[in-house]
Amino acid sequence: METLLKEQSDLKQQLKKSILITCLVFVFCGLLYDRITQKVNISDRYIENGNIIVVLDGEGQCYIGDDLNGAEWVRSDENNVCVMPLIDKGNIYIRNKYNHLCETLEDQKFSYVESIKINYGTVYLAIDGKEKVTYTSSLTGVVDEPVVFSSDNEQIATVDSDGTVHGLSKGKANLTVTYGDKQDSVEIIVTDLITTMAPEYDMEKPFLPCGVFSKEDNDLMDEILFSRVEKAGYHTRAGAVAAGRFLAMEFPYRINYFTENGRMGSCRGNYIDGEGRYYHRGLYLDPSRYENINMDYTMSGPAPWGCTIYEASYNRNAANGLDCSGSMTWILVQAGYDPGDIGAGITPWCLAMADLGERIWLADAYDNKTLKVGDLLSGGDGGPEGGGHIAMCVGIDKEGYVYVAEELGYHYYWGYMIRKYDRAGLLHYFYWQVDMDEFYGEDGNLTDYWIEE
């Protein structure tokens, strides 16, 4: 009996031990399972230096791709950060350090703005003027964020959502364009020294008075002129057109017609600069520009445009300005070309403006639509073989009207201006298109007309 009781007691003890061991195993297995399956979560993710950065809330592994076949997992570093090469889109997979899959984010797009840059420098505006600022951006993927423009001084200039800047009052402001986390800025200068571009030339525009502009004014307007040429394309056809348009449409005065007292070179024999011609970049509005002129070769000057000097051809005193070939030479110089010291007349013994390119009968060029802005036009009282007048086409509209920049010296049409011609009027005054393709080499940012339609 005692033996039986002892055996039963031993059996109970063994059973208790087995139960205890089993419970411990279950507890251990549960703890081990919890540990192995412990979830690791994404606490942050972003793009940096061409990589996708995934920040975890614990130690783990990351993979980005379409599926897990052949996946190459990236282990997180000591800061629980996974760094992976940037792809356009895919799924994000996260597993813990025991290889247990914890999280899947499907169909993720990985895009960012690499850079944004405004396409040109300082924006110069007349009061009530406007200009659309353009930019170039570099993106990875598809960025679903708007481009935002802003002005830091809306009393001076405001900007629309499409980048159109409006000049309100004289002064300076800064325009900033923001795209994603990238920005670029440009200065806006609103000035009363220039006027807004109009659909057509204002024939009531006053002639330039003497001394109305200071050196600082001259400097600023030179900057504006150069910026117009640079935007169109320096050393291009468009750059020349921009200079021709600026002098007529944005410069607030008309430049007087002044018959040259002599050129710098061979055909006339007189070596004179700054009297009916001006062979330098910029506007001739202030005596500070005398430093550009060789004082050994003057007749009655120097004198800025608008100031009175002796005009030898008419034996009189007149306001200094430009003649027709002088104005065309000035335009080409602004765009970075050196046409030489040449006049308008077509002569077999002397190079002329009409010799800068192939001469094409203007009626054919007009009808065949080969006339381009920037081409010179030869005409005048000398007839087709003599010429005597030179001008430049600076606009062609949808109706076929041609806008011609020219310096004229008769009656109502006196001084530098842009005249609008229909076919009959054009062919009445001009005979030849001077095709300037080879002379310019490049077209640049060419536009037929200067007004947004």
Image (tube, rainbow, N blue to C red):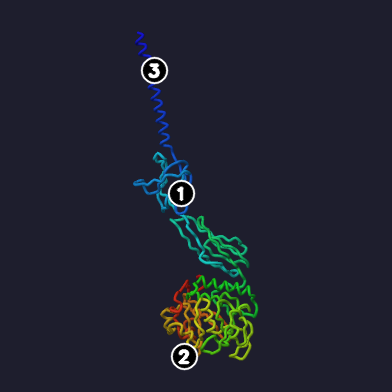
Residue at image coords 50%, 73%: 234
Q: Between disc 2 and disc 3, whose residue precedes? A: 3
Q: Which mark is residue 53?
A: 1
In the image, taking residue 358 as reference, residue 307 lies left or right, namely: right
Q: Amino acid at mark 1?
A: Ile
Q: Foreground: 108 or 290?
A: 290
Q: What's the amino acid at mark 3?
A: Gln
Q: Is disc 1 placed on a helix, strand or loop? A: strand
Residue placed furthest toward the top: 1
- Of residues 423 and 220, which is closer to you in this image? 220
Answer few, some or many: residues within 10 Å of disc 1's Cα (few below 14, many 20 plus, some between 14 and 19). Answer: some
Q: Is residue 215 above or below residue 276?
A: above
Q: Residue at x 55, y 79 (%)?
A: 280
The x, y position of residue 11, in whole percent, is: 36, 16
Tell me residue 116's x, y (percent): 50, 60
Q: Earlier in the sequence, mark 1 or mark 3?
A: 3
Instruction: Between residue 220 and residue 379, name the one nearer to us.
Output: 220
Q: Which mark is residue 13?
A: 3
Q: x%, y% of residue 129?
A: 57, 69
Tell me if I can see residue 412 in this picture.
Answer: no
Indicate the quadrant where residue 76 lies.
top left
Query: What distance separates the C-alpha of mark 1 from that of mark 2?
Result: 75 Å
Callout 3: SS = helix
Amino acid type of the residue that numbered disc 2 sits on in the rendered structure: Trp
- Residue 338: mark in rendering: none
Give the quadrant of residue 416.
bottom right
Residue 132, x across and y down, in percent: 53, 66
Q: Could one spot residue 93 in this view of the protein? A: yes
The residues tagged by marks 1 and 3 sit, at their Cα atoms, a distance apart of: 58 Å
Give the residue at mark 2: 349
